[in-house]
Amino acid sequence: MNVVFMITGLLFVFAVGYLFSNDRKHIKYKRIGIMLGVQFILVFTLMNTSAGLTIVTNIGKFFEQLMSIADAGIDFVLGGIVNEGEEPFIFSALLPLVFISVLIGIFNHFKILPVIIKYTGIILSKITGMGKLESYFAVSTAVLGQPEVFLTVMKQIPLLSQKRLYTICTSAMSAVSMAMVGAYMTMLEPKYVVTAVALNIFSALIIANIINPYDVSDEEDLIQTDEQKRVPFFQMVSQSVMDGLKLVVTVAAMLLGFISLMELINVIFLGMFDISFQTLMGYVFAPVAFIMGVPWSEVVDAGSIMATKLVTNEFVAMLNFEKISEGLSQKTTAIVSVYLVSFANFGTVGIVAGSIRSISEKQGNYISKVALKLLLGATLASVISGTIMGLVI
């Protein structure tokens, strides 16, 4: 049955993508087939072999160790504020982002991450058949996140064709930054987070080859990353601390606003229709959850979480998922967990459009114009990743 649901999930993605494709005659079937094959190998290796399980387990332990190391600073500055036995989300998941941001800043400062990203992108372009810039961007987004990643190709953005711009923005919404991975692992099983990060790189490029197919000439296909001005080490550490703190404040503020707004909408729907908005959206998304492989008895719960992520953000959805996941099967937990690990939501579209507009007003206006198609592409990429995960559970 796993194979059947894998086929139905992928057919659903292809049908929707084909319907909204910019150029149906030139959909890159060969590239799509190769990338799906790579995803099958990845998910089988990571979930069903001792070597793969060792890899995801050790990566999970690594991030857990980082989070515990970050606790030293949190306890020193804020120790005694939290009541004994209680662990507010901002302390357990958000404040450690400051330390992880510093760590990423150090790896960037010593040119470790840029080298890894560049050459991984080049290798990826050989596998996918996509341009080197697109492959570089798919990898770098999974490490740096957005809007920071756009700054690394700032000079190229005004010169990109609209098709190439759509592809890199889809990658930006489909991936998650390394700084966020530790926070996600406090709410989801680490092995699913690690697997999702790897799958999403290919899922975004698969969608690009359906909705937005094109070829890149050798003359265009250059990686010209913009070198940021090198600053003294301790100045870089200070900037990274502030960047991490801004991220914490931004996420915390979004959670405060979105969770309260969701509660207001639920109260209104319960008063008017005797059904919560999340449950209603669960019924809307239930068919999608089912064809991805979620058991029929759990499709409404799964659909509700999937809808919550789209309407609000992944953090709100993960927090809600934590409350119900113990009552769900391992298959549903795996599929929904992988689906949640991306930035595909309405709020991120605004962040991406704003980031592009700050670099090029013309390109920013184009992204605003295709915002809904961009969100559709990123969401379909999440569906692909979740469906592929369901194959091996």
Image: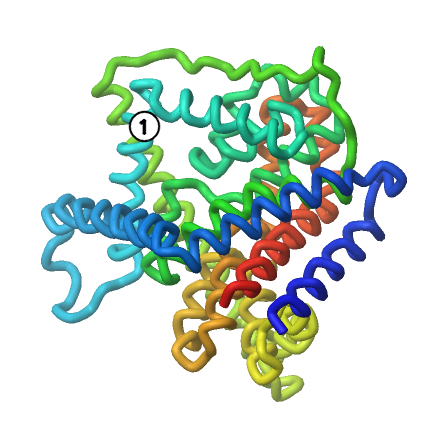
Q: Residue furthest right?
A: 25
| Mark 1 crowdedness (10 Å alpha carbons): few <14, some 14-19, many ≥20 | many
Q: What element carries label 1?
A: helix
- Residue 206 higher or lower than 106, as above or below: below
Q: Mark 1 points at which residue?
A: 105
The N terminus sits in image quarter: bottom right
Seen from the viewer's position, the closer of residues 166 and 239 is 166
Q: For the point 21% across and 48% down, which residue is it?
A: 65
Query: Quadrant of the rendered structure where residue 353 is?
Result: top right
* Rendered location of residue 45, percent (x, y): 45, 52
Query: Quadrant of the rendered structure where residue 294 is?
Result: bottom right
Seen from the viewer's position, the closer of residues 9 and 276 is 9
* Rendered location of residue 301, percent (x, y): 55, 77
Q: For the point 70% across and 35% down, which residue is it?
A: 166
* Rendered location of residue 222, percent (x, y): 62, 15
- Residue 128 higher or lower than 295, as above or below: above
* Residue 75 horizontal side relative to residue 254, left or right: left
